Image (spheres, helix red, strand yellow):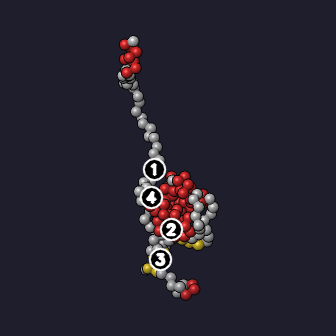
Amino acid sequence: MGGFGLPILFRGDFMLVKCKCHSEKIDRGTAFKVIINNKNEYYCTEEDYLRIQNDKETRKNLLDKINNIFGYVITNTILYKELSEITKVHSYSKINSYVNENSQMLEKYMGKSFNNEYGKIKYFTTIIKNNIKDYIMTTPTSIKQSDAEVVGVMYKAKSRKKSMDAYLDELE
C-alpha cells in the first residue's frame, strides 16, 4: 500500500503511471514527464504533450475571439457545452479558423437584439454548426523562389483589333 491507503501499481520492476492524454497506464521510465505546480504529469510521448498544449492555446484564442465578437466576456457555461459538442466532430483549430475568417459576419449577426444571453449563444453556435461542415481551412501559401534564370523574353504583343469607330474614322 502506498500513502493514504492507495495501492501503488507495479508491473514487474516498473511503476505504472496514468497518461494525461490517453488515460492509459504506462511505464514511468518511458513516459514523458512534466512538472506543473510541483505536481508530476505524465504523457505517452512529448508529441502528445505538445499537441495538448497547442489545443489549449487554440481553445483560449477561440474563446478570446468569441468574447471580442460578443463585445464582453461570456460567463454562461452553455457556450462551453455547445463548443464541446462541436469539437466531437471538428477540431478547435478548424473552429478557430472559421471564426477568424468570418468574424465580421458573426459580429453583424450578434448585433441583433436577443431576449437573453442563452438565446444569443445558441444562435451563435448554431451558425457555426451549420456552416463549419462545408468550411475548408485555408493554409497560407508561400511563394517559392526558384533558381531558374530568365535568359530572354520571347513575348510579342499582339496588335489590337480595330473597333467599329476606327473603321468609320478611316472612311471619313
Q: Which of 48 and 118 lies nearest the eye of the viewer?
A: 118
Local crowd size for mark 1, using a 10 Å CA cut-off: few (<14), some (14–19), many (≥20): few
Identify the element where label 1 is drawn.
Answer: loop
Question: Which amino acid lies under the numbered mark 1 shown in the image of this protein?
Answer: Thr
Q: Earlier in the sequence, mark 2 or mark 1?
A: 2
Identify the element where label 2 is drawn.
Answer: helix
Residue for badge 3:
16
Residue for badge 2:
82
Question: Which amino acid lies under the numbered mark 3 shown in the image of this protein?
Answer: Leu
Q: Earlier in the sequence, mark 3 or mark 1?
A: 3
Identify the element where label 3 is drawn.
Answer: strand
Local crowd size for mark 3, using a 10 Å CA cut-off: few (<14), some (14–19), many (≥20): some
Local crowd size for mark 4, using a 10 Å CA cut-off: few (<14), some (14–19), many (≥20): few
Against 54, residue 17 (above or below) is below
Determine contact: label 2, label 4, CB under 8 Å. no
Nearest to viewer (mark 3 / mark 1): 1
Q: Which of 78 and 163 lies nearest the eye of the viewer?
A: 163
